[in-house]
Image (cartoon, rainbow, N blue to C red):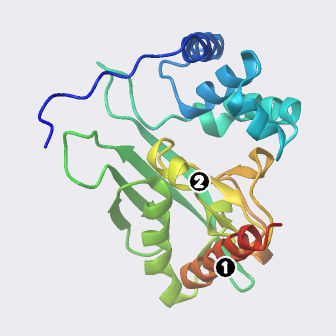
Amino acid sequence: MATEDPVPLQPTPGYRDALRHAERRARRHGHHHLGVEHLLLGILDGEQSVATDVLAKYVDLPELQKATERALASESYHRLPHPRQGEDARAESTPVTLVRGDERQQAVIHWAWQGRSGPSDLYRAQLDWSGEPIDVGAGDMFEALVRIREQLEPQGWLVAVQGSRVDTYPSGMQRDMGGGLSVYVIRIGEPVRMDDVVDTFAEADPGLLATVDAQRRHAADWKRSIQDGVGQGR
């Protein structure tokens, strides 16, 4: 069995070029981090490559570039949950509407990011409403919303925000890198697009709301429809 370290991988000129473009994109938007979105734009800004050839088979590259730019400039993207080094943990308050049949009541969700060196729950959130305050901890804000909803649903209340719609769900990247502050609108049989991104806590039509279980079932049905489509070559 070989015990020597493997030969280090050497970055290609194309890799260095894409990274330079990605850094320029991040600085242009005033971002203090380099994410997958910036790297995607860095690849698209560079010369033709295997990556761009593969992407061009499935998407319109200029439209993909525009959609990614719009996402980087959106309010939900700029609501980064992680403070920069030296800053205090971020805390915010978000007004929401609770719905139960024809009843409506105004409430507020207070939330804060606790930092990665703290407890396992990165976020704390509290719902202030007509009942006893609901306090939860979670790894991201979408999950915090889910835990609040699970305590409201036995009393018939739904939270009228985009993250509570039957047809929305976050991707892993939205949860890991964006703290669950945005979600995708999902349609059975259709892959998501950058234009489908909405703010988790933006107001939603009460007619689109669902229970946590119904939302999860719809997301599972959507995932299967996409997998079936890929398997059938669509």
> For mark 1, does the 10 Å Cα neighbourhood hold few (<14), some (14 to 19), or many (20 or more) residues?
many
Q: What residue type is labelled 2?
A: Pro
Q: Residue 206: x percent and y percent?
A: 75, 73
Picture quadrant where residue 170 is located: bottom right
Q: Name the residue under label 2.
A: 95
Point out the frontmost of discs 1 and 2. Answer: 1
- Residue at 56% of width from left, 16% of height from top? 19
Q: Residue 7: x percent and y percent?
A: 29, 23
In the picture shown, does residue 72 fall above or below 60? above
The disc, 1 or 2, on the residue closer to the chain's N-terminal end is 2
Q: Residue 15: x percent and y percent?
A: 56, 18
Labelled pair 1, 2 in contact (Cβ < 8 Å): no
Image quarter hosting the C terminus: bottom right
- Residue at 75% of width from left, 15% of height from top? 47
Instruction: Report the side of 69 relative to 99 (left or right).
Output: right
What is the CA distance from the residue labelled 1 to the residue labelled 2? 27 Å
In the picture shown, does residue 16 fall above or below 49? above
Image quarter hosting the N terminus: top left
Q: Which of 189 and 135 is in front in this view?
A: 189
In the picture shown, does residue 146 fall above or below 140? below
Q: Which of 24 and 152 is in front in this view?
A: 24
Picture quadrant where residue 120 is located: bottom left
Q: Residue 78: x percent and y percent?
A: 59, 31
In the picture shown, does residue 85 fall above or below 182? above
Task: Find residue 218 and name its label.
Answer: 1
Q: What residue type is labelled 1?
A: His
